[in-house]
Amino acid sequence: DGGITQSPKYLFRKEGQNVTLSCEQNLNHDAMYWYRQDPGQGLRLIYYSQIVNDFQKGDIAEGYSVSREKKESFPLTVTSAQKNPTAFYLCASSRFDINSNQPQHFGDGTRLSIL
Amino acid sequence: KNEVEQSPQNLTAQEGEFITINCSYSVGISALHWLQQHPGGGIVSLFMLSSGKKKHGRLIATINIQEKHSSLHITASHPRDSAVYICAVRYENTDKLIFGTGTRLQVFP
């Protein structure tokens, strides 16, 4: 079945460590997105990519980095510069067409906690 | 104030009740999405609509563009409908989504 796979489901990080969250999709979607979810807040966009080898900052990109070397993969690195990394992270993908609306498909998320 | 407001924040119901969740936004949009987030965290897209009304099984979504308001209705609610329901809007000329904070629904048998 086509879908989005995020791994791991739970991730623990020590202070000062970088960690990378995986997101893979087999939906042949051009666009991919990373969101952060905190209690009592709506999802906020971290980074997004509309095409391979290109990506743009979202609303809360500081302390995060991404790469898009393959269409299927959009890993997110939470760097030590991110001062409050504990959150639930969701990856999404969609077909990209600026002239029409496309639904976003979501993964099951990764919950990151600081030890 | 959130750009996308949902009400109520929390909702409890008895099995079989008719449920309504509301979403209001403040500027022109090209589409509105209703999403369902399960207790484990995964999100499923329920509807994407830009006008009128859509129905899928026991779920109905409506949107009034002039009033900048959408509703999600669940008929004959069931405990398996218990989840967080999230409204998200796509502003005109962008593919970014702005999300509401969600409505937590619990349906008791």
Image (tube, rainbow, N blue to C red):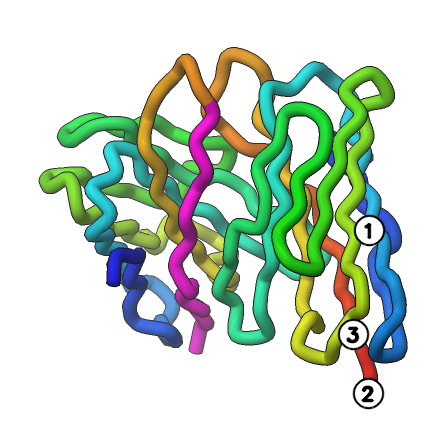
Q: Which residues are magenta?
A: A101-115
Determine if marks 2 and 1 fall on one subunit: yes
The relative height of residue A115 versus residue A66 in the rendered view (above or below) is below
Name the residue rendered at 71%, 35% in the picture.
B53
Q: Which residue is mark 1?
A: B21
Chain letter of disc 3? Answer: B
Viewer-proximal residue among A115 and A112: A112
Check the image and name the residue furthest to the bottom: B109
Label 3 CA crowd tier, 10 Å (few <14, some 14–19, many 20+): many
**10 Å neighbourhood of mark 2: few (<14), some, or many (≥20)?**
few
Amino acid identity at mark 2: Pro
- Residue A18 makes an appearance in the image: no
In the picture provided, is A113 more to the left or to the right than B70? left
**Residue beneath label 2, please?**
B109
Q: Quadrant location of residue A32? A: top left
Q: Earlier in the sequence, mark 3 or mark 1?
A: 1
Question: Quarter of the image containing the N terminus of chain A?
Answer: bottom left
Q: Residues within 10 Å of mark 1 (few under 14, many from 20)?
A: many
Residue receiving disc 3: B106
Disc 2 is attached to a residue of which chain? B
